[in-house]
Each structure stands twice: as structure tokens, then as C-alpha cells.
Image: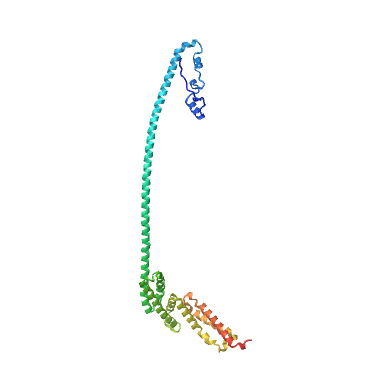
Amino acid sequence: MDVGNAPAVNVDDNGENYSASVSAAIAELLPDNDPFCRADFDVTAYINTLFPTEQSLSQLDDVMEQIQHQIADLDGEIAELVEVQSASGSDGHTALLNARSAIQELFTRVREIQAKTETSESMVKEITRDIKQLDVAKRNLTGSITTLHHLHILLSGLDSLGGWIERRRYGDIASQLPAVLNVLVLFDPYMAVPQVKQLADQVRDLKSRLSVQIAADFKEAFTGGMAHRSSQEILDICRVVSALDPSVKAELSTWFVDQQLSEYHVLYADTEDIAWLDRIDQRYRWFVTKLTEFERSGTSNLFPADWEMGRRLTNDFCITTREMLDRLMTKRAAELD
């Protein structure tokens, strides 16, 4: 009776045990109670189990039929497994081809994206270069417009100032002259240009003419001309002086202080009795009276605050007094203790 040879489960062709994972997989697929799956399967013992006695041989046909059914079932399972495996292999091959096709398509799209990226990068570089050129052009245009605007201010200012000087409109001159002078400074880098140099010369001549005229009007205003000049006119004259060169302001400030102290020089000359040291308090009282008159009469308000004429007057009085006393004590040294 041929019952076939069952495959070993835990032992390979060399008699070695399978790995634990392989053994576990086989154990999951094959039931433990199947004698054909046992590694120590014994054909003789299995037959003796089926036919333990001679009387049991009478069931040989039934056992053979049962075994034939088992063989048929196994053949069916094997055929089904082979078919499934074949289908799986075909599906796997198809899946592999699809995967290759997808990879190829992906590679193609990546190359297309890379090409588009390179094209975009080139376009960005060109756009950036164009933007830089436009930015430079914008700066140059803005600079040109600004320069033209400054030139317009300078030309119109010179024209206006010339007429205002003739009509002695010092309020307008005080407002416009600083703007013209500030704009002229912006043209310093272009003095090599003949037209700009000519404008600068015109401004210099205008300032020179204005300095002479304003000095005369300033002195006239503080030597009797205040009666026919308003306080605003005198203040405008001082504002124009402030806009001119600092030397003009220094000269006129000194002239005004000397005018205010001229009486002091006469009253306390070296030949006067009140000039000696025992009358020094009278000097102080004279100056307090003079300074009070300077403040109360409103004369101090005729000068811009930054001129600080009250402080300047006080400082020059102190310096003058020291020089006068020093000179006087030198002459009359014998009278000193």
C-alpha cells in the first residue's frame, strides 16, 4: 500500500533545523495534528495505526478510497495554488511593468520640471538685470529732476532777490536768501560747469551788494532812523544779516555795542574824577540803567534771539571796564597804597 512520502517540516535536505521564523510560517500553514507533517513520520507505524489487526484489513477498500479522496483533494489544492501562483506571477510582472512605466514617467516629468526651472531661473536673472537697469535709470532720472528743481529755485531766487534788494524788501529777502544759499551748496560738485560757475558768481556779487546796503541801513536804523522804521523792518534787517556771512553779523554787532558804550567812554574817561576806583559803583549803576533801558525800550526785541545782544553788551562792558581801570591805575600808580 503506497501512502506517499510527506515533506519534512523542521529539517532541510542536510538534516539541519530551519530558522524559527520559517518553522513558524510552516506551522501556521500546516496543522499540527497531520501525521504527514511530522518530521519523524514513519510509514510502517502509520499503516499499523490504520490496520492494527488482521480483521481491520477487511476495511482496506474503504481506507484506500478515503486516501484516494485525500489525494484528490490535495491535487486540487495544489492545482489551485499553482494557478494562484501563476496569476500572482503574471500580476507581479504586470505591476513591475507598471512600476517601471510610472518611474519612467516620473523621471520624464522631473526632467521637464528641471528644464522649466532652469528656464525660469534664466528668466528671473534677465528680469533682475532689467530691474537693476530700470532702478539705475530711475535714480538718474530722479537726480536729474531734483537738480533741475534746484536750478529753478536758484534762478528764480536770484531774479527775485535782485528786485527785492533794490526795493529794500528785507522780509522777503530774509525768507528767500537762505534757500538760495542752501541750494547753491548742492551745486558745489558742478562748479567746473561754466553755467553753474556763472550762477555762483552772481550769488557772490549779490551777497556783496546786499552786505554793503544792509550795513548802511542797519546803522541808519540805530542812529536816528528808528523813528521812520517799524520794529518789524529792523528785525527783518537783522534776519538778513544772519543769513549773510558771519563776518557781517560780527561787524554790525560790534558796531552796535560800541554805539551803546560810547557814552560810557566819555563819562568815565581817564581825566574824569568819577573814573577813579572810589567811584567804581557808579560805573555799575550806569550800566544797570543802560541795560534796563535796552530791555524796557524793546530794543532787545529787535534782534534775533540767537544774537544774544544783552549778554554781548554785558560782556563788552566788563572787558571795557577792566581795560579802562587797568590803564587808569597804570597812570596813577603813585596814588595807590
User: Residue 172: percent from the left, percent from the top?
Assistant: 39, 75
Would residue 277 be visible to someone looking at this image? yes
Question: As displayed, is residue 60 above or below residue 83?
Answer: above
- Residue at (52, 82) in percent of width and height: 290
- Residue at (51, 85) in percent of width and height: 263
User: Residue 316: percent from the left, percent from the top?
Assistant: 52, 80
Quadrant of the image for the C terminus? bottom right
Q: Nearer the viewer, residue 33 or 258?
A: 33
The answer to whether residue 22 is left or right of residue 333 is left
Question: As displayed, is residue 295 above or below residue 32?
Answer: below
User: Residue 77: percent from the left, percent from the top?
Assistant: 42, 23
- Residue at (44, 17) in percent of width and height: 67
Q: Quadrant of residue 132?
A: bottom left
Question: As displayed, is residue 43 above or below residue 199?
Answer: above
Q: Quadrant of residue 236?
A: bottom left
Q: Nearer the viewer, residue 202 or 23?
A: 23
Q: Nearer the viewer, residue 134 or 275?
A: 134
